[in-house]
Image (cartoon, rainbow, N blue to C red):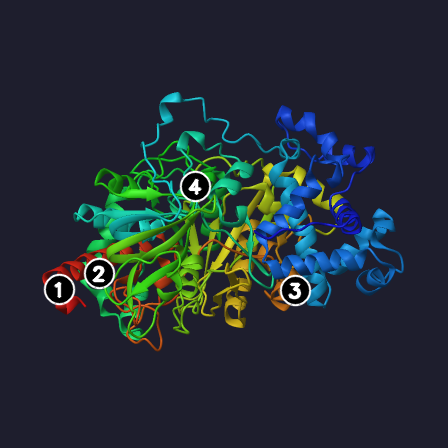
Amino acid sequence: MVNLVMTPGQRAVLTAVADAAFQAHGPETVSEIKALLPPGAPQYQLENLEKFVRTKFSELPGSIDALAQQFCTSLSKENVDKIALTLSLLSTRPGTLLLAGHATPFPDLTVQQRELVLQKWRVSSLPLLRQAFRGLVSLALFVAYNLYDDVLFAIGYPATGDEKRFADPDRLRKHFPYTFEKIEVPYQVFDTDMLVVGSGAGGGVVASELSKKGWNVFVVEKGQYVKPEDMAGTQRDGFKRLYESEGLMATEDGSMNVLAGSTFGGGTVVNWSASLRPQHFLREQWAKEHGLPYFLSTEYAKSIEYVCDRMGVSDEHLEHNRANQLLVEGSKKLGYPISKIPQNTGGHAHACGYCGFGCTYSEKQSGTVTWLRDAAEHGAKFMTETSVERLLFAVSPSSPLPSPETLDKYTPSSNRRHCIGALVKDKNGNLAVIRAKQSTIVSAGTIHSPAVLMRSGLKNPRIGRNLRLHPVVFTTGLYDEHIRPWEGAIMTAVTGNWDGSHHGVKIEVIQSFPGGQAAGFIGWTSSKEHKKTMAQYGNLLTLISIARDRGSGRVFLDSEGKPRMDYTVNSYDGNSLVRGTIAAAEIHLVNGAKRITTAQVDVEDYIPAPGHQYLADPKWKEWVAKIEKAGVYPGRCAIGSAHQMGSCQMGAKPSTSVVDPRGRVWGTDGLYVADASVFPTASGVNPMITNMSLSHSIARFIDEDARETLSQPLQAQL
């Protein structure tokens, strides 16, 4: 784990930066913000508002240490070192002169001077200064609006989670009684037929299918299991226990924040129930352009229907919350196509606006409710909070197991190509070997599956390449109406795709969580304006524009062997996101938003004047031109991602892919990958159903291959 031990000088600088971003303001500002509150604002907001306005960041208990910890959680060691260097420079006169234009150490500047420096960093032409702004200011705002209940109550958000959680005790369901294996002695050995690395959308389906076929299955998961009844529905708890990097994993240049599940059940536990089937154009593209005819087969179609049926995917019981209603209404006014988003909720209505922090009701049919339960009921074993150090390779499945002294000999080579399992390490540092007599299936997700392969010594240069992220930008409207966007079903409607090549954008509603809103969705121009906007949180609606990316990036290993992402939005995808930003802004405009904010640092907010002529208004056209001119560029626009795909690409040739059409890793025996990392391209829709249906198919291939191997004479297997 990365660690940042600050000197007194560094700590003083960090405090000075955070206190300039989140300042204490006086009674005039208190009165000004109180006047903005909606009628019927909750009592808990009224009680906490003045304290919120008059409190600076460092007065939040433990906030500076929490911010330092967030650096270490979200950033690579190399980027944490850059933060430390920036803090050191700003503690000196020469360093502050260089970075801030003042010949006085940064902590000694007035708060007004410090705020002005941050404002200049935000729009600087120098990437270094923009990175400093994102690394220091954005993370400080995330911490303030993620960890502190008093802050959340002050903006009208129910900090303790779903207010209806205990109103209907019959709705709460007890968890399935999973049991978990433990490493109890040094260098323990576990035996199984099939080892599955990862328990998410891919791994869960594979474990279910193979265990039902009669194989002994062992699933190892690096995340922890959180029982549904223990899910509080809060940001603080959800991000810490259910997400990669506790909710903020940044790409290497800091230009994009990535949300990825990291828990028993993986992303299925934290997704927003969207269950969109792979579209025909995608299946046709993969079949014809990537040499994978299986995707046009009836067998693959059956896998799609199977996974949807198992989870009760349907749009028949949808109930749009107010946020989704506004998306529908605005799209219809503009003549944009609008569709329902099917949900994996067992064919029932599911008003759970906190589902991104786990479904305490077990109504969402996540992996722990379906696939992993199926596997458990058919004898599968599970181990959580345990990471795969590397895979083990030998001459044949019957080769002797390695001892601690001979581990280095179990690396892949021309004659050691059979994967016989994995070396794993639990949270206490205990090592074990899990021997897989038949097959090892890597389903660790698009970020970690290539990392496992690379740490294991596999040399295919395609491993980690072709990373697709479905980049997202944010457009926020401030309304007179109290929308309360955290209530009800999260994502139930979608509109978009205007480019005609299936690489355009779709527009949807995002889960409402203040940490993300504060850190990037609405931007920061000053402490006062930011607090004013956040105090009206219940009146904000953020729409996301999500692109099916043509461009790609890569996953690589850092100096500690941990996966990092190198990804920059290319010009084509940037143009698609600009088009999506304009369309989302149009939806806000025709719905009557009184202020519209894009995620672009070079575009000021749009405030319709009295007598505004909507899309025909000259001022509107001027503002749209500014959006087009500003574009979507790294560091000049907040960009996010919640979908990761493609880093272990499936293909017809080893020169252009990592796995073959059956999911087998090229150049190995007994080793497969089954998750979204094998996608040849971005899916263009939420990837869960595509992932599950493909993993279901690969599981059937694994079963067929294993049975064929067993039917061969022993000599043929050597």
Q: Residue furthest front?
A: 405
* Mark 3 or 2, nearer chain start: 2
401 left or right, relative to 274:
left
Q: Are marks 1 and 3 in contact (CB under 8 Å)?
A: no
Q: Residue at x 47, y 37 (%)?
A: 353
Residue matched to label 1:
714
**Residue 237 appears at what percent x and percent y?**
52, 36
What separation in Å lies between label 3 and label 2 (alpha carbons)? 66 Å
Q: Residue at x 69, y 25 (%)?
A: 47
Q: Which mark is residue 398?
A: 2
Under circle 4, the secondary element is loop
The quarter of the picture where residue 102 lies is: bottom right
Crowd class of label 1 (few under 14; some 14 to 19; many from 20; radius 10 Å): few
Residue matched to label 3:
626
Q: Nearer the viewer, residue 628 or 376?
A: 376
* Mark 2 or 1, nearer chain start: 2
What separation in Å lies between label 4 and label 1 (alpha carbons)? 40 Å
Q: Is residue 603 visible?
A: no
What separation in Å lies between label 2 and label 1 (alpha carbons)? 10 Å
What separation in Å lies between label 1 and label 3 (alpha carbons)? 70 Å
Under circle 2, the secondary element is loop
Under circle 1, the secondary element is helix
**Residue 35 appears at what percent x and percent y?**
73, 33
Q: Of discs 3 and 4, which sits in the foreground?
A: 4
Q: Are marks 2 and 1 in contact (CB under 8 Å)?
A: yes
Residue matched to label 4:
224
Crowd class of label 2 (few under 14; some 14 to 19; many from 20; radius 10 Å): few
* Mark 2 or 4, nearer chain start: 4
